[in-house]
Image: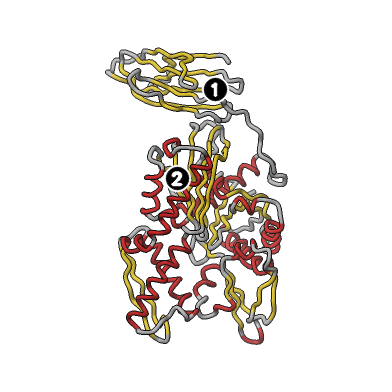
Amino acid sequence: MSVAGLDFGSHAASIALWYEDTDKVDVIADDLGFRCIPTAVAFRAGEDDDVEIITGQAAITQAHKNPKNTFVDLRALLEDESKDTVNVPAMNKDISVTELASHFFRNIHDQIKQQVGKAVRDFVVSVPASLCEEGPRKARMIEAAQAGGCRIKSTVPDAAAVLNAHTFDQKNGNPVVAAVVDIGWSHMEVSIFNCSGGMYFPKGSASSTDMSGSVMVKALSTHCAKDFMRRAKFPCDDNKKAMIKLGMQCEEAMKTLSTNSEAQLDIDSLCEGVDYQGKMSKARFEDLGSIPFIQMKKCIAAALAEAGMEPTEVTCVVMAGGLSGMPRCKALAAAAFPSATFHKQRGMENNEAQAVGAALQGKALSTTQLMDKPPTQTVDAKCMNSSLSLQSDANAPAMLAMPAGTALPAHYELAGNCPAAGGYLKVLVDQNSIGEVVFTPDTAEDSVSVVAKVDVAEDGSVSVEVLQTNTGLIVGSLEVKA
């Protein structure tokens, strides 16, 4: 049984599929070749009172010609409990928001069937944590998906899906303090986790609507509208169709500026038959976004404050969301977390991580026979009350291997080179030594590669083995009972 992972974003969606027969996850494109599918539905009146339903990129492409019958950002409509219906002039009636969104889900269902040759009905959906909570908003989403042929078996918070996609759920991985910096269309969110034993322990988070894809596109659109006014001597910002066309072009320009130094904007008949051509450099675009970038810094600081952590305590940063591909965003994150490394999963774009993570969550549920009864509560885990550090040089500070709060049992590996004369590794708990391993490798070379493997059992017992990499021999060991 294959399982689909869907990143149901506020502005666009991505689909990833876990294939049970090959145990692989692939991000799939729609029939137009887009791997990022706008969450949009449009209605177009035809002959004999027929109404054509258009979804995805095709709906966005015709939006400026048909604005009153085009509905975008469907997730926001589902989340708005005050809005039960929308008016569709092409149909000359109101329809429920659930029915509107069902057309989008039907398109997702049909795209998967068309691309892989079979229907896949079981979905795990990545959404904001607030939409994972049981309530009317989640119920409306599930109802819309069901009407569109998609069975939502489970939801997963966006940040957790990102960590899944970057393999932080591996039980034998080294414990890390990870910051997920997710910059999407409607808002940005920074979440900080202790990751150990294949589990994620949230420490703090913060979000902001003042830094997002929509904010940056609006800043660029405002600039271009003023430029049009300067050239044409009349405004375009009071023309809805013109601003829709301009916004679409500015969104494409923003994507271009993520990888290029300059973007060209070329719009035929933007307003009252007047064309618009313009250029935007990356430096100028970043200058337009100076205030949102300040808000990004504040959001990171707020997440650290809620976690009660210093920036240097974060050991790994994961970027997610469409806007996170901008070099300026990565540079700001690097400055905010000076001791952290950036985790990049090969072959996966930042805006695809949630879909991949949701598909991997589906794999986990399927292989453990929990697809029809997914867990609804967090598993209680025994955690370390103290930190564990390692020191291999008396003249150097100890290196933190397992912070307090690491889930037990825990595993950590440290690789390095050892001189032929031998070496030692001191183990410290809360900076107090509990023992050390003295070892001498079996080699004729001046130095040899070794790896130290540290395991802490559920009862707190510590075991250390030092292996010589080229032979696999254990050249030193230590056992400390709880």
The reply to whether residue 353 is in sight is yes
Q: What residue type is labelled 1?
A: Val
Give the percent coordinates (x, y) of residue 294. 41, 54
Q: Is residue 212 left or right of residue 421?
A: right
Q: Is residue 52 left or right of residue 190?
A: right
Q: Residue at x 40, y 63 (%)?
A: 254
Q: Which residue is drawn at 49% across and 22% down?
A: 430
Q: Earlier in the sequence, mark 1 or mark 2?
A: 2
Q: Residue at x 66, y 87 (%)?
A: 48
In-front residue for pair 287/146: 287
Mark 2 falls on what kind of element? Answer: loop
Bin the neighbour count of mark 1 within 10 Å (Cα to Cα): few under 14, some 14-19, many 20 and up.
many
Quarter of the image containing the C terminus?
top right
Q: Which amino acid does label 2 sit on?
A: Gln
In the displayed structure, 274 sits above or below 447; it is: below
In-front residue for pair 72/222: 222
In the displayed structure, 119 sits above or below 204; it is: below
| Disc 2 target residue | 345
In the displayed structure, 122 sits above or below 411; it is: below
| Disc 1 target residue | 456
Q: Residue at x 56, y 50 (%)?
A: 158
CA distance separating discs 1 and 2: 28 Å
Give the percent coordinates (x, y) of residue 457. 58, 22
Q: Is residue 260 left or right of residue 294?
A: left
Q: Nearer the viewer, mark 1 or mark 2?
A: 1
Q: Quadrant of residue 66?
A: bottom right
Mark 1 falls on what kind of element? Answer: strand
Bin the neighbour count of mark 2 within 10 Å (Cα to Cα): few under 14, some 14-19, many 20 and up.
few
Give the percent coordinates (x, y) of residue 21. 59, 46
Q: Is residue 374 left or right of residue 161?
A: right
